[in-house]
Image (cartoon, rainbow, N blue to C red):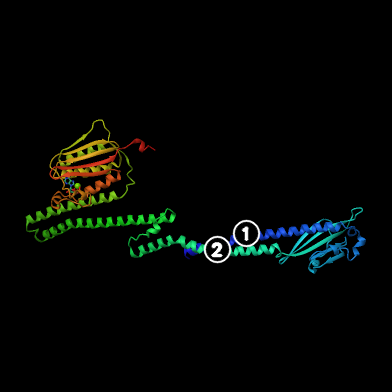
Amino acid sequence: MKLKTKIRIYTIGGLVCILVFFSLLIYVFFVRFSTNAEIRLLWTRAQTILRKPEVRSEQAWEEPELLREFLGDRMMIRIIDPSGTIRSNVENDPGLASYAPVYRTAYHTRVVPVWAERRIYIQVPILTVKNKRQVGVLELGKSFHLARGYLRVLLITLSSGTLVGILVAIFAAFFYVKWIYKPVEALAETMEQIEQSGSFTRLDPVFAEGDDEFGRLGGTFNRMMDRLEENYRRQRHFVEDASHELRTPLTVIQSYAGMLHRWGSENPAIRKEAVDAIQTEADRLRDLVEGLLQSADSQESQPDAPYMEVDLLELAGKTAEELSLSFQRQISLHSEPDVQFPVFGNGKRLKQMLINLLDNAIKYSGLSVELRLERDGVWVVLHIVDQGEGIAPRHLPRIFERFYRVDEARTRSTGGSGLGLSIVEQIVKEHGGTVELVSSRGEGTTATVRLPAYMQEDHPVE
Ligand SMILES: Nc1ncnc2c1ncn2[C@@H]1O[C@H](COP(=O)(O)OP(=O)(O)OP(=O)(O)O)[C@@H](O)[C@H]1O
Ligand SMILES: [Mg+2]
């Protein structure tokens, strides 16, 4: 069943129940109230009858007109003696006499419901005037129809009120639910459309505005779609680029392997060339795969590596030393004396960032490389300066893109895959910082990384 129908049924059903319940409650109270009023009237009438001295002396009971003057509409008045015999009786409603005479020594009331009628009986002991001895019982019976007078008006009012209430409820539930349900319906339709077509369809902006829950739901849905589409686009790009990059060394390996197969056994020169080329391309492939893995790593948050205080000066010193040893190149480190360079982050990732930047500075320059650290207010600033060939301004805007290389021929010979800087950018972003490259052709390049300085009070120890 549709949600819309369910809401309608529940709303109308609930309202009908409430209306019927309250109508019944009012009805029952009113019946009680009017019955009690009739009983009180009968008691008053009994008192009036007993004030007549003849009623209280047994001798006068046989007088047929004794009680006639007290008889009202649809009533019965009778006197019962101690043996249970009716000694005097007047009535104008034969139904009332069907109640068998019983002699009682105490006051007594009885209400008998007969369909929409009520029969009320009261009994009062008759005491003699002289010595207050009980000689009989005066019994009054009255019959009245419930749907009469006020009760009829009440019944009509209640039933028509309930009916109008139900009609209003049906009408309101129909339009109200239709109105409320619109955004949900639009959302369901959009989702079905997405499921069928596989496209990133957005919800109509009408349903994605407004600060009520539906507006927020629609807005969130559209923003989620934006992000999904962006992620999907980036991922497709990445896969396209990665497969293109992987294919190139594989093609080279494949053709050299073919050459080796055909002429390798006879021609040692060809054999050497092929094996060298295969080795170089295999190294390239390995670097590429490593770079890709790191790059994929950057996309993931790393729950296993908690952030902690990292002394960037110490980390930069160590990394520079390691690289200068393995590349046999000089890397000089400068920092203001007596200044601390603490940052909050993942030491392994920050080291990767330093390696990628220093690797570029070493690879793309023949001269010494300089590493400078300084403080700028709440920032720790790191400069990596080389005096290499530099980068032409037209390349700078795209330099942080994955697989982007300035010069195919040159970078092929230096073996880069064009992933280093994109990884750097990712890591810096992760740590809440910024990175930029300033370069001029022939003069060199300066990479500047700004990371928020670690403040003890920002990260209290738990
Ligand atoms: N310090 C630099 N001097 C001159 N050119 C640079 C410098 N740093 C980067 N580049 C240019 O920017 C390109 C992209 O650099 P990136 O580090 O992303 O890739 P890569 O060095 O080619 O490969 P990888 O770092 O993945 O091994 C490089 O190919 C290079 O042309
Ligand atoms: Mg690089």
Asked which secondary structure carries label 2, the reply is helix
Q: Nearer the viewer, mark 2 or mark 1?
A: 2
Name the disc covering residue 22, or none: 1
Distance from disc 2 to disc 1, alpha carbons, whole Å, reads 17 Å
The answer to whether 38 is drawn above or below residue 444 in the figure is below
Q: Quadrant of residue 229?
A: bottom left
Which quadrant holds the C terminus? top left
Horizontal side of 125 relative to 369 (left or right) equals right
The picture places residue 414, in percent across and down from the top left corner, at 15, 48
Horizontal side of 159 relative to 441 (left or right) equals right
Name the disc covering residue 168, or none: 2
Of the residues under marks 2 and 1, which one precedes in the sequence? 1
Write the residue at 69% across / 62% down: 151
Horizontal side of 33 relative to 370 (left or right) equals right
- Camera sees residue 352: no
The picture places residue 301, in percent across and down from the top left corner, at 32, 48
Identified by mark 2, the residue type is Val
Write the residue at 25% across / 51% down: 293
Front in this rendered view, residue 411 or 113 = 113
Write the residue at 57% across / 64% down: 166
Q: Residue furthest top?
A: 338
Asked which secondary structure carries label 1, the reply is helix
The picture places residue 188, in percent across and down from the top left corner, at 41, 62
Identified by mark 1, the residue type is Phe
